[in-house]
Amino acid sequence: MTVLLREAIGDRLRHARTNQRRTLRDISRAARVSLGYLSEVERGQKEASSELLASICDALDLPLGELLHKVAADVSAIDNVEVAPVDEKVEASKRRAPERESAEAGLEGGRLVSELIGNDLADLRISPPPRMSPALRTTISAPKMVAA
């Protein structure tokens, strides 16, 4: 699985901006970059020059070295992810079973796996891997009816 550098940089820039609760317009003005171009950089559609990247990082009060370090960790983590091939017939049968169960129960839900929660894509590297079954399980029960 490969990730483009411009996409990883864009994801990190958007993450930094949204964590600061700042708008594209605010950052584009501070960085002296057009709003549309900044949006394309964040979406990984445009390669940002080093000067432009430095300007955006200054507007975000984010050191360029820190951004690059996080991007390198993200790319490294994604490159080490192994994707197993999926048999389409098996996958289709697995998809049908949970649909029937959730339709009967009337609820859908799940749970967070604490080992996978983190700020970086690098946090996805966990050991040992969590034990998960292929079937969707939920801890949410049907609502209790109260007599009126």
Image (cartoon, rainbow, N blue to C red):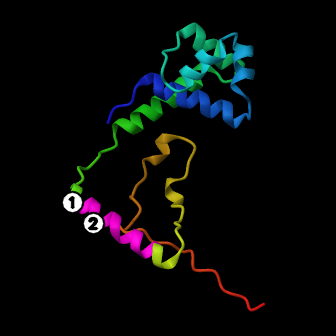
The question of residue 103 being in magenta is answered with no
The residue sitting at 75% across, 22% down in the picture is 26
Residue 32's place in the image compared with 135, above or below, is: above
Q: Position of residue 30 (x, y in %)?
A: 74, 15
Q: Is residue 77 left or right of residue 139?
A: left
Q: Residues within 10 Å of mark 1 (few under 14, many from 20)?
A: few
Q: Which mark is residue 7?
A: none
- Quarter of the figure with the C terminus: bottom right
Q: Residues within 10 Å of mark 2 (few under 14, many from 20)?
A: few
Residue 37's place in the image compared with 126, above or below, is: above
* Label 1 close to label 2 by CB (< 8 Å): yes
The residue sitting at 23% across, 55% down in the picture is 88
Residue segment shown in magenta = 89-102
Q: Position of residue 7 (x, y in %)?
A: 47, 27
The residue that mark 1 highlights is 89
Residue 64's place in the image compared with 141, above or below, is: above
The residue sitting at 49% across, 24% down in the picture is 44
The residue sitting at 48% across, 41% down in the picture is 121
The residue that mark 2 highlights is 93
The question of residue 95 being in magenta is answered with yes
Q: Is residue 144 left or right of residue 107?
A: right
Q: Quadrant of residue 144?
A: bottom right
Q: Look at label 2 and name its amino acid.
A: Ser
Q: Look at label 1 and name its amino acid.
A: Lys
